[in-house]
């Protein structure tokens, strides 16, 4: 049986991803989780702390899932393509509701808060992963610039899939990413 703390996190994750952070109140989370308010505050003294924990767990789950998915590919370019394939699979899930990190950043803006730092940490982790894949293809000096551009493509694809229903957005973004990587790779080869 799941412990009550995990039940709260799972319930909050589902509700926040469906309806947003501000639209979901503590009472609704408690009602759907079947947990008492005292239990909630034992684990999470505030809703903000619950949001941070939801994002932390989501970040770890996504990073682990992506890492495991990429293990089946051999070359850096195949692995990079795998990042887009993982996103394509995610976009096509029945319960796809967009990026919880982007939504959190939009709802909890302000430069000094744990929610925004957690959302930024997820983007940094993805950027670093992509940079590491790009290093052998384009060299260290270009890899970070391209990694940031690729994360922007993925963020745009996520938004297009969520808002416009463009389930093929990850494949469209891959077409652009592949072109810019191959262009930079060819520059490196002819230099």
Image (cartoon, helix red, strand yellow):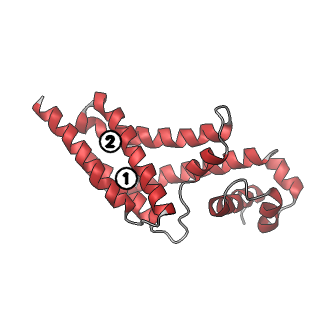
- Return the residue found at the far front: 164
Report helix, strand or loop for mark 1.
helix
- Return the residue found at the far right: 38
Q: Front-most of 1 and 6?
A: 6
Rendered location of residue 166, percent (x, y): 42, 65
- C-alpha distance separating marks 2 and 1: 10 Å
Residue at 15% across, 38% down: 186
Q: Say left or right for 179 vs 19.
A: left
- Determine crowd level at label 1: few under 14, some 14-19, many 20+ residues with C-alpha closer than 10 A: many
Q: Front-most of 165 and 88?
A: 165
Q: Say left or right for 167 vs 191.
A: right
- Determine crowd level at label 2: few under 14, some 14-19, many 20+ residues with C-alpha closer than 10 A: some
Q: Which mark is residue 64?
A: none
Rendered location of residue 181, percent (x, y): 25, 43
| Position of the C terminus by quadrant | top left
- Return the residue found at the far left: 190
Q: Is residue 91 above or below residue 173?
A: below
Q: Point out the tag, 2 or 1, that comes first from the N-terminus.
A: 1
| Position of the N terminus by quadrant | bottom right
Residue at 58% across, 43% down: 119
Q: Is residue 47 visible?
A: yes
Residue at 75% across, 55% down: 5
Q: Say left or right for 19 vs 134.
A: right
Q: Say left or right for 58 vs 33.
A: left
Residue at 36% across, 44% down: 150
Q: Are marks 2 and 1 in contact (CB under 8 Å)?
A: yes
Rendered location of residue 159, percent (x, y): 48, 56
Rendered location of residue 51, percent (x, y): 69, 49
Q: Which mark is residue 83?
A: 1
Report helix, strand or loop for mark 2.
helix
Q: Which mark is residue 133?
A: 2
Q: Is residue 24 above or below residue 123?
A: below
């Amino acid at each position: 049986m799941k412990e009550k703390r995990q039940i709260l996190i799972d319930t909050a994750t589902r509700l926040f991803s469906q309806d947003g952070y501000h639209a979901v109140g503590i009472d609704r989370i408690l009602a759907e989780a079947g947990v008492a308010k005292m239990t909630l505050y034992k684990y999470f003294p505030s809703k903000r702390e619950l949001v941070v924990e939801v994002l932390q767990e989501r970040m770890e789950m996504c990073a682990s899932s992506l890492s495991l998915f990429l293990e089946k590919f051999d070359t850096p370019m195949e692995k990079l393509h795998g990042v887009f394939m993982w996103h394509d699979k995610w976009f096509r899930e029945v319960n796809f509701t967009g990026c919880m990190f982007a939504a959190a950043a939009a709802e909890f803006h302000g430069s000094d808060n744990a929610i925004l730092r957690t959302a930024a940490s997820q983007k940094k982790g993805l950027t670093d992963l992509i940079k590491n894949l790009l290093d052998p293809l384009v060299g260290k000096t270009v890899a970070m610039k391209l990694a940031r551009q690729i994360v922007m493509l993925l963020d745009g694809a996520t938004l297009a899939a969520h808002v416009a229903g463009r389930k093929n957005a990850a494949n469209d973004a891959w077409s652009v990413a592949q072109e810019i990587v191959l262009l930079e790779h060819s520059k490196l080869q002819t230099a």
